[in-house]
Amino acid sequence: MKLPIQDRESAGRELARALEDYRNRKHLVVLALPRGGVPVAAEIAQHLGAELDLMIVRKLGMPGHEELAMGAIASGGVRVLNRQVLDYGGVSDETIERVAERELQELERREHAYRGDRPWPDMSDATVILVDDGLATGATMGAALKALKVHRPHEVIVAVPVAPADTIRNLRNSADKVVCLETPAYFNSIGQWYQDFHQVSDDEVRRLLARFWKE
């Protein structure tokens, strides 16, 4: 993939080609990390003939440096902390709890806004592809992988357009397969590798999901 990436949709199409071996596989579920991962995942799910759903995760941003993840939380009460970042920043337990409580409220809001009362897909023995629009520390994806384990999937694939090489290496210990199109050497933020990195709105998420969730 040529950098910078045009937009999330083009990233999704490139990833879909890299995941061609999974096309029309039985019991295939694509899970997007909202909000930015949803446009990417929608392209993948459409190309592979897969079910599309969400894995809602919230980054725990370092106070004053919110782009830096000191951890993440996910649906089901899962919490993953980046001890290296916490130690470096001298973050207190009280600060962690304050940030986690705020992000939990947003996580619950998104679950209600996007899914309502819709039941979660059956992921037992499924092939699950976890998708985001890029990774930095990998904390959010780590929380997603941990949360997914309780569903006992058959195979878990992480698919992202861009991430640091060390983040990808670390994730290979938790996923069955990691597909990442680009691992640039100097990585400051995900947005630097996109031409169009607009903030995805709740309405855009709901519109994309509605294409797959028609009754």
Image (cartoon, helix red, strand yellow):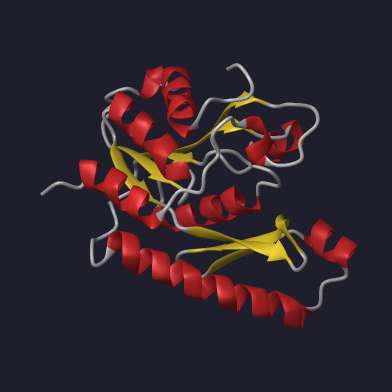
Q: In the figure, is residue 171 to the left or right of 47? A: right
In depth, the one of 67 and 213 nearer the eye is 67
Q: Relative to the observer, which residue lies in front, 36 or 119?
A: 36
Residue toward you, 159 or 106 = 106
Depicted 198 relative to depicted 49: above or below: below
Q: Quadrant of residue 202?
A: bottom left
Q: Is residue 13 above or below residue 36?
A: above
The image position of residue 14, as x and y in percent, is 47, 21
Q: Answer with the quarter of the image where residue 195 lies.
A: top right
Query: Could you tell me which residue is drawn at 48 percent across and 53 percent down?
Result: 149
Q: Position of residue 93 (x, y in %)?
A: 76, 79
Residue 75: x and y in percent read 46, 64
Residue at horizontal 32 percent and vertical 22 percent from the top: 23
Residue sitting at the far bottom: 94
- Residue drawn 27% across the image and 24% down it: 24
From where the camera sits, is residue 154 visible?
Answer: no
**Position in image of residue 193 (x %, y %):** 65, 31
**Residue at point 66%, 80% (across, down):** 98
- 176 versus 107 height, above or below: above
On the question of residue 56 being in view, the answer is yes
Count every numbered label the image shows and give the total: 0
Quadrant for the N terminus, please.
top right
